[in-house]
Amino acid sequence: MIKNILKSGALLLLAVGMLAACKGKTTTAETENAESVAAKQCPVVFSADSAMAYVEAQCAFGPRVPNSEAHRQCGDYLVNEFRRQGLTVIEQKDDITAWDGKVLHNRNIIASYKPELTERILVCAHWDCRPWADADKDESRHRDPVMGANDGASGVAVLLELGRLLSQIDPKVGVDLICFDSEDYGRPYWAEGGDGSSDWCLGSQYWARRPHVEGYTARYGILLDMVGGEGARFHYEGYSLQYAQPIVGKVWNAAHTAGFGEYFPMRDGGYVTDDHVPLNEIAQIPTIDIIPFSRDAGSSFSPHWHTVNDTPENIAPATLRAVGQTVVQVLWEEQ
Ligand SMILES: [Zn+2]
């Protein structure tokens, strides 16, 4: 994804206190707070160890760069794992031409829980890796691929662990876990061509125009991107507030209810062009992005972003758990 046209504080504090809306009650702010504190925690536990094992399993194939053997093998692994969990898997395999004229064998993988239900929630992440570590401190590594333990595998690991838990969570809606491909193929600084933001998020752009089920829609979507960094803090992302403010409120409230409010400060972050943008703008499904924000990291999301050090050793299982348990809470609360 590309980041962070940092905009000033205009969006501050828009998203708090949405609880009344989802409970269908009109209450005073005071009562809302009381309800929020009293809200129950989901008893189903999201396992940090299991999610970490899913990060390692993906990285064991090598960098999952589109058209590579590691990519093909990991795609097969994801399909098999979701099927083993009892989910219904649909694959979208289509050739997409990238900014450099290269044809990418794009593979979007959609794992559905209770596909027969019309009321649905979508949780998604990208599973491909960036071919170029173009933010590495060492310029000689810029054309090496990124392992994508955080930028790719972390979000998918949370989806896999959710897949394992869905029947225990027993949400009252159908759930689609979507692994988008070809997110991170955006043009590196040394190359010509492309037009900037549309170089990225190719798999989600494709899906948003041609979803896996004709006429598909969902109540809302949650995108997970780089959800395993040590000390990560997830602020409100700009496009999420612009298109899906009530969902931002719902998710951040759930994080606090689940006991992980520390990871989810109720503060503005930046704008990030990520897979949620085509979902909002093309598919018109209100979708938020859970993505780390750091004022100190300058143009990057974390010290390892788009470097050769985005490896499993630099993943914090505690962060995977904070994000995973938050999504468990959201799904459990859904009526
Ligand atoms: Zn990336």
Image (spheres, rainbow, N blue to C red):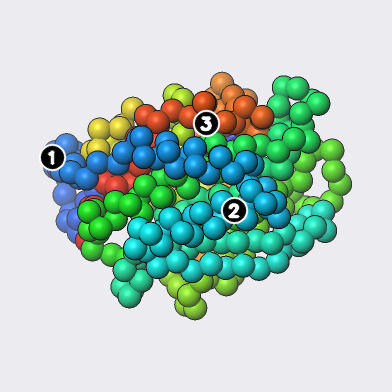
Of labels 1 and 3, the one closer to you: 3
Q: Secondary structure at mark 3?
A: helix
Foreground residue among 178 and 291: 178
Q: Secondary structure at mark 1?
A: helix
What's the residue at 70%, 30% (across, down)? 135
Tag 1 near tag 2, CB within 8 Å: no
Name the spot of residue 211 as percent of width and height, x first.
53, 70
Q: Is residue 164 above or below residue 263?
A: below
- In the picture of the structure, the residue carrying the numbered disc 3 is 312
**Image side of residue 109 versus residue 185, left or right:** left
Residue behind mark 1: 38
* Tag 2 residue: 73
What amino acid does circle 1 point to? Ala
Residue at x-position 40% and y-position 31%: 317
Q: Residue furthest bottom?
A: 214
Observer-nearest residue: 319 or 267? 319
Residue 168 lies, in percent from the top left, at 22, 54
Q: Nearer the viewer, residue 141 or 280?
A: 141
Q: Along the polypeptide, which appears first: circle 1 or circle 2?
A: 1
The mark that comes first in sequence, 3 or 2, is 2
Q: Label 3 neighbourhood size at 10 Å, few (<14), some (14-19), many (20+)? A: many
Marks 1 and 3, the one that precedes in the sequence: 1
Residue 261 in the image: x percent, y percent?
Answer: 31, 32
Q: Amino acid at mark 2?
A: Gln
Q: Is residue 103 left or right of residue 306?
A: right
> Label 3 sits on what residue type?
Pro
Give the CA distance from mark 1 to mark 3: 37 Å
Check whether the beta carbons of the residues at disc 3 and disc 2 lie within 8 A of each other: no
Crowd rating for badge 1 (residues with CA inside 10 Å; few <14, some 14–19, many 20+): few
The answer, for residue 220, to whether it is visible in the render is: no
